[in-house]
Image: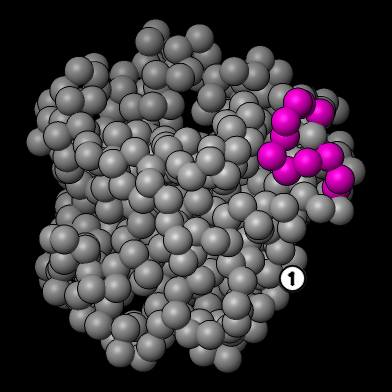
Amino acid sequence: MSSTSVPVPGRPIRRPLGFATAALVVCGVSVVACAPAGDPDPGESASSTALQRYYDQKLQWKGCTDFATSPREKEILGKSPAQCAWLSVPLDYDDPQGTSTTVAVLRVAARGESQGSLLFNPGGPGGSGVLGGLAVATQLTKSRITERFDVIGFDPRGVGATKPAADCYTEGGTTRGDEVFPLLPTTASLTEEDTRAVLDRCTKGSGGEKALTQMGTRTTARDMDVLRSALGEEKLTFLGQSYGTRLGAVYAEQFPQRVRAMILDGAFDPNMGTIERRLFAYAGFQRAFEAMAATCAKTPNCPLGTDPKAWTSTFQSIVQPLRDKPVPALDKTLDFDTALGGVMAGLYSLDKWPTIASGLAEVRQGRGDTLLKLTFDFEGGDPDAVVNGNATEAAFAINCMDEQRLTPQDAGQLRAKTYEVAPFMNPGGDPAKGARDGCEFWPAPPTLGIPYAENIKGLPDTLVISITGDPTTPHQGAITLADTLGSALLTVKGEGHTVVSSGKNTCVDTIAADYLIDLKLPTKMPTCSV
């Protein structure tokens, strides 16, 4: 989602490169003095020996086909030059002598002489880092980044091949599956029975209640530190996009003196609570929708017409009837939720905007193929050969341990306000009917804490990158994150969500590569464009 703010110049560097302090810092959840890189968290002194065995492990690299979670993934990974390994971690860091579990890790070797590992998170939450790491290595073939770094991807807790993975569907989908786990949870009418049932199904399919409570961002950040050590790295070099900016910020909070370099692209605002952040995001999608409609209006036969005041109402007249009368689409059907999901998926990329217009015109003719395909493309392609198949369930489980818990009253107010700030999303009818937080009976409270990543001491210079027209993580959020971390801010004018991993922007790639490789940032940060 984009922000309507005027593009701002990059923030000045607040500290010289490599700045550190011996002051007390936040490591884990306790305020303690950080140990040297590679050592277990000193806040866990009573169990440091038990943790040390995880930090001392050596990864055993092999082919990646055993790490696939679907036939399509097996085909993709089988053809790749990547290697994979299992990282052993404690299921619960508060009990490191207890049960162990495994994290799936992928490595694509540097194209030239490697200077170390670059850990990558593609976003989500719920996005597969195994597949994401392979994708970014493929997309950055002309970048100095992949020439000098081994690209490391990993599946966070609950995701993909990491065990246990979040599994909240029955084999054929939960009884209320598509409504409890919608792409856009803004229309489902749920009961207390529904939310209790989904907890029961998630518990049975995802390794039990203890596993569910360990799928939050703070636990995954601790896994990242074990992975850093297992890779033989004294300090972490990290590229996180979208949700990966939250993960990176939390790692920086927990282990500031173990950070070498960190790029956060498409930033989550660390100060925004759940309701505020979602409304901020939805408002950005409304802005992106209006920008798309304005582009459409310049073309012949735009299905939204040429009157800006009527774009939203015209859109509603096309898609709202789908709630009661879905239309055929491919070998399936297109309902309101899926149509809106396809449109919002297309809003992420400027080059998809004409496809949205074509899809809306097609719906008027009684077919939904194009909008359904937009949804499938966003989720990984062929719907019958799923890629990153548990992304929706993983996102749900991770958010249950991250986001603030909402009462039914909170959920109803959020839904009503959503349609105020993003009326194109309104399905019609009573907006608050059946609004509930699907996490309301989760077995543990959220552990992230909002705001997060505050008052970090000893963090070296980091780089936040943001597109001014981002349709899901607004530019203002990047300004806030940069201020919070004391980061440099690279502003990129244009539309889109995240930019570094595409490898298509020379301006951004040059600055990112200079920073990651040489720890150099421009004295005066330029503004790039897409």
What residue is shown with label 1?
420
Q: In which quarter of the image is residue 524?
A: top right
Q: Is mark 1 on a helix, strand or loop?
A: helix
Instruction: Give the percent coordinates (x, y) of residue 65.
Output: 12, 30
Q: Above or below — where is 428 with respect to 53? A: below
- The x, y position of residue 427, in whole percent, is 58, 67
Which residue reaches farthest front? 365
Task: Look at 35% across and 34% down and name the residue there.
Answer: 381
In this rendering, position of residue 519 left or right of residue 85: right
User: Could you tell me residue 416's position as x and y percent?
Assistant: 66, 78
Q: Residue at the location (74% across, 71% down)?
A: 420
Q: Is 301 inside the magenta-drawn segment?
A: yes
Give the percent coordinates (x, y) of residue 274.
Answer: 59, 72
Residue 434 in sight in this render: yes
For image coordinates 50% across by 59% down, the residue present is 322
Foreground residue among 43 and 1 = 1
Q: Determine the main secondary structure of the stretch shown in magenta.
A: loop
Of 53 and 103, nearer the camera is 103
Q: Residues within 10 Å of mark 1 (few under 14, many from 20)?
A: some
Q: Is residue 523 left or right of residue 211?
A: right
Q: Quadrant of residue 152?
A: top left
Quadrant of image for the C terminus: top right
- Compared with 47, 391 (above or below) is above
Residue range (magenta):
298-308
